[in-house]
Image (cartoon, rainbow, N blue to C red):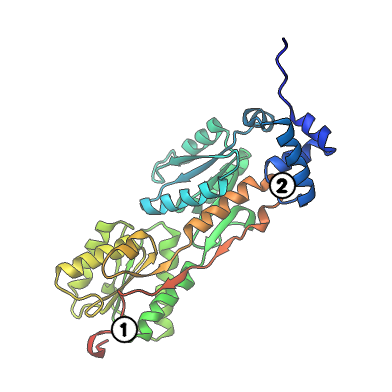
Amino acid sequence: MRKTQQPTINDVARESGVSKKTVSRVINQSPLLNEETRQKVQNVIAELGYVPNPQARALALRRNFLIGLVHDNPNAQTVLSVQSGILEALRGTDFELVVRPVNRGSPTMLEDIRAFLERQRLFGVVLLPPISENDALAKLCDSIGCRYVRMGSAALDDDQHMVASNDREAVREAVSYLIEMGHRRIGLVAGPHGFRSAHERRLGFEDALREADITVPRSYFTDGTYRFNSGQQAGERLLDLLPRPTAIFCSNDEMAAGVLHIARQRGLDVPGDLSIVGFDDTTIASHIWPPLTTVRWPIASMAHSAALKLVSADEGTSAREPSMFLSTLIRRASASPPKNGAA
């Protein structure tokens, strides 16, 4: 007895009275179809028991159904949030996520990434800061025909190849909030050199001081690495100052948690003796005590949009995904007016 042949995409197209491309669009959940056509094709797929073959599709496209995430980011929570956003975008599709950490300080970084992209034959790649800020990497992706989207704290590319946030404006708002409460001696724990996010957030800090006609000593500025221990080290330096700051803005939540740890270790009341504001609104911000006033960085939403830009690129719909995401100030208990009105 002959084995019944599995239905093909041609069978679905013939029974539905549409083209193979239309069937493909239904399979790929393209928004370009009207609901009537989509439902008709889906009904035929169900009746025939047709199962799309990702391997065959990959062979035809000369691409695997893989979305890459390439990063060199010291903050594990940021990477996890990005992964979460991408995976949500890929839910219900044939796409899978491949994560590749790299060393941006390596002289062979570009060659290593090229080898990875060519070996995996990725459908597209999301580039996370700070390597997303490398124009040579974007050109490399273009040169080998690999779709890419760059994530960043400022516009880095055209809308098709970018998702960004308004870090500078968001930090200016956060520091202005401290100023409105009466703080004048405000310290900064900046991010690491070479990160556009660190640069944008520092500019936002300086904007707020300049608009309020406030000048603070250079000793109130210190750098961190976006890690908890660097926040502790920054806290030690800033809280040794005389007079010490009445408020400190930290360029991410992990460093803010480090500063808070040192403040409590020294017997300081937060926010009575010292107000602390972070950036990201990661889980740590609401889990520490007091809960952290911070800037909510919509990193997962940015990653979600980046992934959708990639998987919808063939249908010409990637431009419909937003490219700019606004960060917002989340007011919690770690910030208050300075004690006794002292600025």
Q: Does residue 117 appear left or right of residue 194 in this picture?
A: right
| C-alpha span from label 2 to label 1 | 52 Å
Q: Considering the image in quadrants, where does the N terminus appear?
A: top right
User: Any mark on residue 183, and which?
Assistant: 1
10 Å crowding of disc 2: few (<14), some (14-19), many (20+): few
Q: Quick one: 166 or 7, which is closer to the camera?
A: 7
The residue that disc 2 covers is: 315
Taking the spot 36% from the left edge, 59% from the top edge, the residue there is 283
10 Å crowding of disc 1: few (<14), some (14-19), many (20+): many
Amino acid type at mark 1: His
Vertical arrangement, residue 7 with respect to residue 147, above or below: above
Taking the spot 27% from the left edge, 58% from the top edge, the residue there is 228
Q: Considering the image in quadrants, where does the C terminus appear?
A: bottom left
* Chain-order first, disc 2 or disc 1: 1
Residue 147 at x, y = what percent? 61, 44
Vertical arrangement, residue 29 with respect to residue 4, above or below: below
Judging from the image, what secondary structure is the residue with disc 1 in?
Answer: loop
Vertical arrangement, residue 165 with respect to residue 304, above or below: below
Judging from the image, what secondary structure is the residue with disc 2 in?
Answer: helix
Q: Does residue 166 appear left or right of residue 6 in this picture?
A: left
Residue 273 at x, y = what percent? 21, 79
Amino acid type at mark 2: Glu
Q: Quick one: 178 or 112, which is closer to the camera?
A: 178
Residue 290 at x, y = what percent? 27, 70
- Outermost residue, bottom direction? 341
- Contact check, label 2 and label 1, Cβ < 8 Å: no
**In the rendered image, which quarter is residue 194 located in?**
bottom left
**In the rendered image, which quarter is residue 342 located in?**
bottom left
Residue 258 at x, y = what percent? 25, 62
Q: Quick one: 20 or 118, which is closer to the camera?
A: 20
Q: Does residue 120 appear left or right of residue 53 in this picture?
A: left
